[in-house]
Image (cartoon, rainbow, N blue to C red):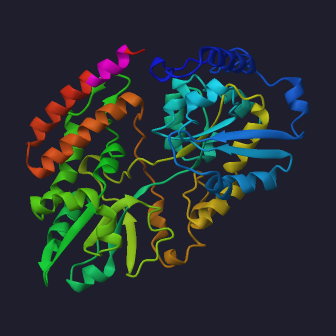
């Protein structure tokens, strides 16, 4: 039976809720998470009959128009018998609202941080049997994305990764040339980049320049040491762990080069400082960030610098998963759709437009951003590393601890607390909030 967290039930009519839950359980044929339920002969016979497939992306701002551009139009062209419906997440259409209204959902689109909606509402469905039935080869997909899902699903698979993103180091060639400083080199450590950042942090003709800008929360969450803020397996808050301290200390030092009077700008304007103001020489962020941006300066990109403790290891990737729900009455058709979205055909089209593919096919990877004029002549191979850090857990409890870590980071870079004190206080606060969250269940 679908369980809705009791903190989310308020305001949902009891009769409507019970009807919705009963309907969902009936559609599930024995439980949303059941891996043993098999498609009926009716499902198999009706695979090309007209059918509506409902897509939903919880905790995300994706619009129906955006979804149709990204996926929907291609799905309709590939499967003419499928009517594509996308429900936008908004007030009144949150997951609990949809379940209460009896709205069926066939496929949920999630990131590593929003996939918890599947389990929170018991909508997960193990597609292992469908993978076997359709002879789908998981080995063609980016290994860390598959491993993340297998660990999340306790050895099963709740969905397939259809697109991804990675973190890279962009640099402004014009700005580095202006001050005669060499470009960052592939294979650099963070210590190397720190020394380069110090050289580029200066005042010239009344303008403050910075060596490097980044989003500290993304760097910590997707760090190359794969250390989470909270370890689900051990039920341990990791904020005082030596590896976690190393990650925080590494990025904090870049914020402190210019002095505390500039910290707020570095915390809140990391993109503008590099892209708009052009006062930051380097920018560590999502590899897709320059897609569609009409840059007025000469830039290029290299893989992220490495931690000494993890030589050659790129940051964790940020894949998006398409997951079939347990309540779907069209699981075979839904699987055909998500399998198509990971096909060489679709992945090639996606890659050429500048969306990082999840297949490891060389020709698909080499075609990355070919249709993006601003990427002509750029270092595309930087987007594909041989070694990628395993994706750490991103569940709700981890998010609680990560929030406390973000607060600690601000305290460290502004000088209000030293690293050990800030992380100790954050760990205590995280443990208290995590315990309170667990007591709700």
Left or right side of 376 for 280: left
Q: Nearer the viewer, residue 32 or 5?
A: 5
Q: Residue at x 65, y 19 (%)?
A: 16
Residue 136 visible in this rendered orientation of the protein? no
x and y percentages locating residue 364 in the rendered image: 62, 61
Residue 102 in the image: above or below residue 268:
above
Residue 436 visible in this rendered orientation of the protein? yes
Q: Residue at x 78, y 32 (%)?
A: 330
Bounds of the magenta segment:
433-439
x and y percentages locating residue 196 in the rendered image: 20, 69
Residue 16 in the image: above or below residue 60:
above
Residue 437 is a magenta residue: yes
- The count of marks equals 0
x and y percentages locating residue 258 in the rendered image: 12, 65
Q: Residue at x 32, y 30 (%)?
A: 230
Residue 37 in the image: above or below residue 381:
above
Residue 49 is a magenta residue: no
x and y percentages locating residue 379 in the rendered image: 45, 72
Q: Nearer the viewer, residue 301 or 74?
A: 74
Q: Quadrant of the N terminus?
A: top right
Left or right side of 129 for 290: left
Q: Quadrant of residue 431?
A: top left
Left or right side of 147 for 38: right
Residue 435 in the image: above or below residue 275:
above
Q: Nearer the viewer, residue 362 or 413?
A: 413
Q: Residue at x 45, y 68 (%)?
A: 290
Left or right side of 149 for 262: left
Q: Main secondary structure of the magenta part?
A: helix
């Amino acid at each position: 039976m679908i369980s809705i967290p009791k903190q989310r039930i308020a305001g949902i009519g009891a009769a409507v809720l019970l009807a919705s839950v009963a309907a969902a359980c009936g559609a599930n044929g024995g439980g949303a998470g059941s891996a043993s339920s098999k498609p009926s002969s009716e499902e198999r016979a009706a695979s090309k009959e007209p059918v509506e497939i409902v897509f939903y992306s919880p905790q995300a701002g994706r619009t129906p128009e955006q979804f149709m551009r990204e996926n929907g139009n291609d799905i309709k062209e590939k499967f003419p018998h499928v009517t594509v419906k996308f429900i936008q997440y908004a007030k009144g259409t949150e997951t609990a609202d949809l379940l209460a209204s009896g709205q069926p959902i066939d496929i949920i689109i999630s990131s590593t941080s929003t996939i918890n909606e599947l389990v929170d509402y018991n909508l997960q469905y193990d597609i292992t049997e469908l993978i076997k039935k359709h002879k789908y080869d998981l080995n063609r997909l980016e290994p860390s994305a598959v491993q993340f899902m297998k660990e999340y699903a306790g050895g099963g698979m709740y969905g397939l990764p259809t697109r991804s993103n990675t973190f890279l180091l962009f640099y402004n060639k014009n700005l580095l040339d202006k001050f005669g400083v060499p470009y960052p080199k592939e294979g650099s450590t963070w210590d190397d980049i720190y020394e380069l950042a110090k050289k580029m942090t200066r005042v010239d003709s009344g303008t403050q320049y910075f060596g490097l800008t980044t989003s500290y929360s993304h760097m910590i969450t997707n760090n190359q040491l794969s250390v989470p803020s909270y370890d689900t397996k051990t039920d341990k808050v990791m904020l005082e762990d030596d590896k976690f301290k190393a990650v925080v200390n590494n990025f904090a030092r870049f914020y402190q080069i210019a002095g505390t009077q500039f910290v707020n700008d570095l915390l809140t304007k990391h993109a503008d400082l590099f892209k708009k103001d052009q006062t930051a020489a380097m920018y560590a962020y999502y590899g897709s960030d320059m897609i569609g941006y009409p840059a007025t300066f000469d830039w290029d990109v290299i893989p992220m610098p490495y931690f000494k403790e993890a030589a050659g290891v790129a940051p964790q990737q940020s894949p998006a998963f398409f997951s079939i729900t347990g309540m779907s009455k069209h699981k075979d058709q839904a699987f055909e759709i998500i399998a198509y979205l990971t096909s060489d055909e679709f992945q090639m089209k996606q890659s050429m437009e500048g969306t990082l593919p999840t297949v490891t096919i060389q020709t698909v990877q080499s075609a990355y951003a070919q249709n993006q004029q601003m990427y002509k002549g750029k270092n595309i191979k930087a987007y594909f590393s041989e070694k990628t850090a395993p994706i750490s857990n991103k569940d709700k409890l981890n998010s609680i601890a990560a929030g406390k870590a973000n607060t600690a980071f601000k305290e460290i870079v502004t000088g209000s607390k030293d690293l050990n004190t800030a992380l100790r206080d954050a760990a205590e606060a995280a443990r208290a909030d995590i315990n309170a969250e667990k007591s709700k269940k």
